[in-house]
Each structure stands twice: as C-alpha cells, then as structure tokens.
Image (cartoon, coloured by chain):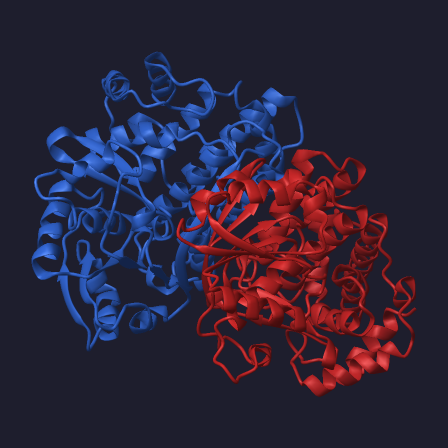
Chain colours: A blue, B red
Amino acid sequence: MNHFTFHNPVKVVFGRGSIAELPRLIPSDANVMVLYGGGSIRRNGVYDQVAGALEGLDWGEFGGIAPNPRYDTCIKAAAMASAEGASFLLAVGGGSVLDAAKFVAVAALYPPGRDPWEIMLTVNQVERAVPLGCVMTLPATGSEMNGNAVVTRDSTREKLFFKSEKVYPRFSILDPSVTFSLPPRQTANGVIDAFVHVMEQYLTYPVNAPLQDRQAEAILQTLLEEGPKCLARPDDYDARANVMWCATNALNGLLGCGVPGDFASHRIGHELTALYELDHARTLAITFPAVTKHLRAQKLGKLVQYAERVWGVTGGDDDAKADAAIAKTEAFFHSLGVGTRLTDHGIPPEAIAKVADRLEARGQKLSEQVPLTRADVEAILTLAAE
Amino acid sequence: MNHFTFHNPVKVVFGRGSIAELPRLIPSDANVMVLYGGGSIRRNGVYDQVAGALEGLDWGEFGGIAPNPRYDTCIKAAAMASAEGASFLLAVGGGSVLDAAKFVAVAALYPPGRDPWEIMLTVNQVERAVPLGCVMTLPATGSEMNGNAVVTRDSTREKLFFKSEKVYPRFSILDPSVTFSLPPRQTANGVIDAFVHVMEQYLTYPVNAPLQDRQAEAILQTLLEEGPKCLARPDDYDARANVMWCATNALNGLLGCGVPGDFASHRIGHELTALYELDHARTLAITFPAVTKHLRAQKLGKLVQYAERVWGVTGGDDDAKADAAIAKTEAFFHSLGVGTRLTDHGIPPEAIAKVADRLEARGQKLSEQVPLTRADVEAILTLAAE
C-alpha cells in the first residue's frame, strides 16, 4: 500500500425529508445565496422545500447555472455574492451547480485585479472561500463529498478542474426521493459517472491494498444491481438511495487512499465535452472502454480481478477474462441506453486529432504508470471510433 | 436504507515514517502534553521518533496509562494538563491511551465542582475539549478515527463509554511499521476487535443497504486474509498496513450509515473486563459467538449472507449455513490463539449472574430489535460457558 493522507470533513445528512434540516446546518446569522440551475427544482418541489426551510433567514438567489457550468456565469454570481455580502452559499442541484458554487466561493473572495481562472491551472493555491453547503439532487459526480470542481470557459473552450480543502461543503443534504423525477438520461449518466470514478481508482496496477480493492468492488457491484432498478422504477426509494450513496462514496477520497489512480478517461472526456458539449458521463462511456483496451497489458492484473470478482467471469485465460470484462462493461453502459462510440454521439472523426492536440498542448500527465503520449490519445480515440 | 448523518473530520496520515509529519500537524504555538502507556514506546523507538519530531515545540509528558484506562489516572492527567495550560494533547499508543486522552481532553476543561464521569452516563453533552491528535501504535479499537472513548472506574468497577464530536482527533498518524514489535497477543486482539466492530454493524437485519453490507464484507475478508499474516511474519509491512487500515475503517462511522447496529457483544464484554480485567478483544471472542447463537433466528437473513459471501458456504439450508458461519468464526478466533469460552480465560461460572445483574441495573437497551432481558444475558453467557 502506498502512503496517503485522508481528510474529509463534509457532513452528510441523508434520507427522505432531510431538506428540512437546513436551519440546523446553516449559521442563523448567515447571509445566504442560493445557487441553482435551469428550473427543474421549481417543477419538482425542491425549490419550495428549500425556501420553506430557509424562512426567517436572510437569503437571495442566483439561478440559471447550466450543465458544464460556465466561467462567465460563475463570475457574474461571484460579483453578486460580493456585492450582497453573501456569507454562505447554498448549491441546490446536481454536480454542475455545486461545482459552480465552489468556484464562486473562491472567486467572490479573490484578490481584486487577478483572474480566479488561475486556480484551474495550478494545484491547491486557494487561500480562502465563502463557506458553502448543498442540497444534492443528482447522484453522479460525488462533488457533494469532495473539494473538486470542474468549470468550462467558453472563450478558450476549456473544461478544467481545481481541487481544494477550502471548498469542501460544510454539509450535503442527500434526499433520494428528490431524484425520482430525474429523466432517464440523467439517471443513466449518474450511474456511469459513479461507475467510472470507481474504475479510475481501481483499474490501475496492484499495490497490495485488498481493502481498497474490495471497497471499490462493493460500489461497482451495487451500481450494477441498483442502477437498472432506478431506470425501471424511478420512484424506488431504496434503489435511488443506494445509487445516491454509491455516487458519494465513489469520489470522496476513500477509494484512492494508498493506491494509484488513472484519470485519463476523465481528462480525455473533458476535452470532448469542451469541444462538442456532450454530457460528461457520455464522454466517459466512450473514453473509459477505449482507455482500458489501449492499456490492457499494463492493467491486466486488475482487469482479471475485476472480471472475476465483479462480473463472475471464471472461464478462459487472463486475456480472455480481460476481454470479457471490457465487453461486459460496455454492455452495461448500452443497457442503460448509452452508446460507447464517438459516432453514437455524433462526434466527428476529426475530434481524434483535435483532442490529441489539446491534451498535448496542456502537457498534463495522463495514466498511472507510463504517461500517455499524443499517439496514445489518438490510438485511444481511434478505438472509440471503431 | 435508514436515514443517517455522517461526519468524520479526522485527518489520517498513513505510511512508514509518517511520525515525522507531526510538526506540520500540531499548531506551532501549542503547549503540547504527550500521553502514553507503559513504556513499550520507549523500547520500540516510537518515543524517540515523537520527541525528535516535537523538537522546538513546547511539550511535556504524562506516561503510565494502563490498558483499560482508569478514571483516576485520567483525572491526574487532566489536573496536570490544566495546571500546565496544555493546549494540545498528543496520545502516543493504542486505543487505551487515545481513549484516556479523549477523557482527559474533556476533564481538563470541565466546570469546577462537577465530576466529568457524568459524561459517561449521558450522550453528547460534552461542550468543550482540548484539541488532540494521536500516533496510533496498535490497530484495534478504531479510536483513531472516531469520537468514542471507553474508561474504567475502579471505585465502582464500571467500564463505560462516551461519544462526542468534540474529541475527534484533529489528526491520527498511522505508521504500520511501528506495529512490527507488537506481541502476538496484542496483534490477535486487534484483529478480533476490528472483526467484531464490523460484525456488530453488519449482523443485524436487512434494511436494503447493499453498499454498506459489501463495505463490511470487504473489511471482514481482508482481516481473514491479512490477520494471520501479521502473526506469521510480524514485519510484513503490507499485512500490517492492511490490518491497520481495516481497524480504522471498521469503526469510523461509515459502516453504520443507514443500518441498525447491535453492540450487545461489546456491552457484555465491557462488564467482563470491568469484573475480571480480561483483555477487551478476548471478551468479544467470548461474547460475540454467544450473542449470535442466542439471536440466530432474529439474525438469520444476514447470517446466511455472511456465510455465503465471507466464508463461501454454499451447501445446506439456511440453518446449516448459519451454524457453519458461526463455527467458522469461532475457528478463526481459535486460529489466532484466542479461546471463545469463559473457561478458556479463567472466568468463573458466577460471572453469568453478576454480569446479568449489572446490565439489568444499568438499564441500557441491548441488541438491535427486541431489547435483551436479564434472562437473555444469562442465556448468552451460558452459551459461552458450554
């Protein structure tokens, strides 16, 4: 096992009706700014629940945060937060709204004359942030229990992330019943996003960390069982609760303790979203199988373990087991209604060279052992085009 | 899944050499009081490592904290902490030292004229505590990542616990290599303690929480594999690391999220320790199998799952699987050199009535569904005497 530091102070309040706990969680003297998205929370009753719970507190709101939240929107929200002296941000929505709130929390207190986008280009240089909390309505990104955020900048077509302990939510309210009204597309996306988060921390190379391996397999197996139930019966409380808790556990730092990670699928996927506005999870359904095929030799040990333990594959040699595991993973994504090829999502062939160019220019290390080259990225996306 | 709140802000710093991180973790202006036990840290080099890391800080020490830490010792340590104006407590040792430090942290700031023992008799009434951290040298209790502490009072022969967010360690340093020198008895005790912590949160009744079930099974399977390796080769770093991380994960609150718990084995075990000074883990090796046999019908669903998933039992009907699982659990404890009967540890037959009397007088609810009666406790201990 490798060395590690684990620290996650987020308070999770989980269960039906938990939005009513808000007054206990937000400081009573706070000046609250509620951030939300495109209006689904007005249709499904969450807005009214939040407004009811905040009664008597001093609060305002900023709506209209789009999926893949935009830098320009965040800057507007930050200006409003500064102008109104917001002392607490409450994100109500999915990972996009929460990620935006994390960026706003930093941008609202950023030194005048400097562009907060610089936090996306380095690591852990955030010095302060407005405290924030969230009501999570879409289990997927795990943002409700980590200090990560992804923001997109239109002017440069960049989708980048930052990470800081300063933007851990003080609390996250998870009420599975508010996810009953999610469209099937978002439900499926959430299951795939969580699944790939786990795989990126699990499917690397063995470092003798059997507990972390099994904690990862626990989430994968549960998503395989419970994800399809959410699509089949959207108001199945237990299935929704189980998927929601899986998504949170998939990226709260625990799985990554003492083991290597390989976030190449995410990095390549972010470029696809930045260029073609494709849903984040759908980019992962494309990139993850392709990365795995391309790095099959390097990942063979864990691929075989994954095949045996998660998919119950027992026949054949190691190569056959690895192939079966990849095929079954793709079939699972298909069963959720999500294609795994560029063409399934209307991404043109020229995307391959474009994404390779962009990642080469960014110069970030990809994969867990040998850094991926430009040729590797091209090869991966070519596999995704077949 | 039941409703829950999860909040665990402990920072874990894990790996060989991590004691050297102390200066980064303790406030540089702190007045530090180091608490430790009977001197094993002087023999195995941990004391010197800690002293070296604290060089330049203002620190003093309080040694001699015994296993099953005593109220009287804690009160002395608290008086010294108050007198010297300690602003940070550093526990260096196993769960006993850390539990003592937690009690001291509260007692040192307790209102004059009141007896801090009262925190053992109610829940969550702790208002303030001196901040504390730890260097954990014995993986077992999980105290390094929770707000629980157990203290024994000789004058009344009581072993009781309290729980408060105020005594979460600010950090816990876990260096598996410092456990190489543990005697086999303590290594075995640690594995059993962690194993039973998991079982008490797992072996109740199903509430459709498949992730939590699998997270529990992940720890159980890892302890079964890695525990014996630590006994066979005490300086096997990976095995020590895996057991250490299992022990921390066994009682950091995650397994208990949204599921019922049954801590009857611990409660009955504490009485045995209070009366006969038997090692905590050894009391659990006695009580856990007996509680499970007594409540077999109530726990049958989970017992069968445990048999199948953790022990690979496939043959026979449900009753046969349950019996096999209990027998295999006892055989595992025996394989670690720990007996599972009162007589194995020299506990006399009159213990049965004594413990039943004490628990009846304490009036605490035991077990997860139907509270155990005095007759139940007698029946359980009679099973442990057979």
Which residue is found at the position 19% from the left and 49% from the top?
A: A104
Residue A150, x across and y down, in percent: 26, 40
Please tell me in which quadrant of the rendered image residue B271 appears.
bottom right
Residue B354 can be seen in this image:
yes
Which residue is found at the position 26% from the left and 29% from the top?
A: A272
Query: Is B59 located above or below residue B302 in the figure?
Result: above
Residue A165, x across and y down, in percent: 34, 47
Return the residue nearer the eye: B138 or B107: B107
Which residue is found at the position 80% from the left and 37% from the top?
A: B232
Which residue is found at the position 23% from the left and 51% from the top?
A: A129
In this view, the residue farthest toward the top is: A375
Residue A167, x across and y down, in percent: 29, 50
In this view, the residue farthest toward the bottom is: B361
Query: Is A357 located above or below residue A328 in the figure?
Result: above
Residue A250 can be seen in this image:
no
Q: Is residue B314 left or right of residue B48?
A: right
Residue B315, x across and y down, in percent: 80, 50
